[in-house]
Amino acid sequence: MKFIRFKAQDDSIHKGIITDEGIDEIKGDIYGEWDYTGTTFAPRDISLLAPLEPNQIIGIGANYVAQEQDLPSELPEIPVFFFKPTSSVIGPNEEIVIPEGINQVKFESELAVVIGKEAKNIAESDILDYVFGYTVGNDVTAPQFFHQDGHWTIGKSFDTFTPLGPVIETELNPFKVNVEARLNDVEKQNSSTNLMIIPILRMISYLSNVMTLKPGDVILTGSPVGAELVGPGDVIECSIKEIGALENTFAEAKLGAKIR
Ligand code: MG
């Protein structure tokens, strides 16, 4: 099923499921008890929002190789993980605002895993029981704001730096998809998820042994080779064919947005 959040013409916010006939509105907790309201919306009458309001967002650093023979024989003992604030989330077609003082940021198209059940100390073989579904994420990054001592938090955390969408697909086989990005309609990224250095099950199992994962947690699983620096006016489309395309335009910061 394809779960969405959307705004109706009167600006009210709803949840729904995309069907061949339109959008069936639902109410309740998508990770628990929910039901159809009986109302159907036409796609032309709505605008998509990020398909969830994440509980927390965890990313993994540099997680793809260019080709299978480059995969390391031994995995790092401690993978590089980072958090992104939930305030950085935007939906499809919203602007990604480039912080004042710099003129370029990086796009990173990624498969985003949405956790559906509380998960603690879960074996790799059981991880999929705890996954609700999958969406596309753009892990926008301002490398100039990486701290000299190594932390990435600031460079990953600006408002608008985590576009998510367009839907949460619950039926996906995450091991058989390609993560793609098109910049101004030119392909820049297109890699199978089997080029991940730390595979999805290992990544989530590892995290669950550190912290209790909760419904609504989003795990950004890393970006394929090909991410680039971009500037104001550039249009980025991150996509996974089986989920959909997430398009956003980069924009200059408005006056007053400067960090001091
Ligand atoms: Mg990333």
Image (cartoon, rainbow, N blue to C red):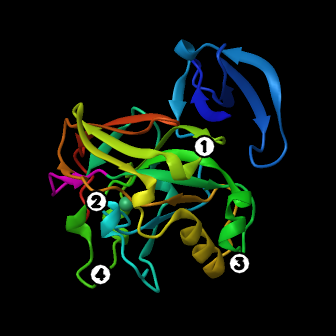
In which quadrant will I find the C terminus?
bottom left
Q: CA distance from mark 2 to mark 4?
A: 24 Å
* Image mark count: 4
Q: Which residue is mark 4?
A: 150
Badge 1 or badge 2: first in the primary sequence: 2
Q: Secondary structure at mark 2?
A: loop
Q: At which x and y percent is residue 170?
A: 66, 42
Q: At which x and y percent is residue 85?
A: 48, 61
**Residue drawn 65% across and 74% down?**
208
Q: CA distance from mark 3 to mark 1?
A: 24 Å
Q: Which residue is mark 1?
A: 172
Q: Which residues are magenta?
A: 100-107
| Amino acid tagged 3 | Asn
**Of tags 3 and 1, which is closer to the observer?**
1
**Of tags 2 and 3, which is closer to the observer?**
2
Q: CA distance from mark 3 to mark 4?
A: 28 Å
| Amino acid tagged 1 | Leu
Q: Which residue is mark 2?
A: 66
Q: Which residue is mark 3?
A: 121
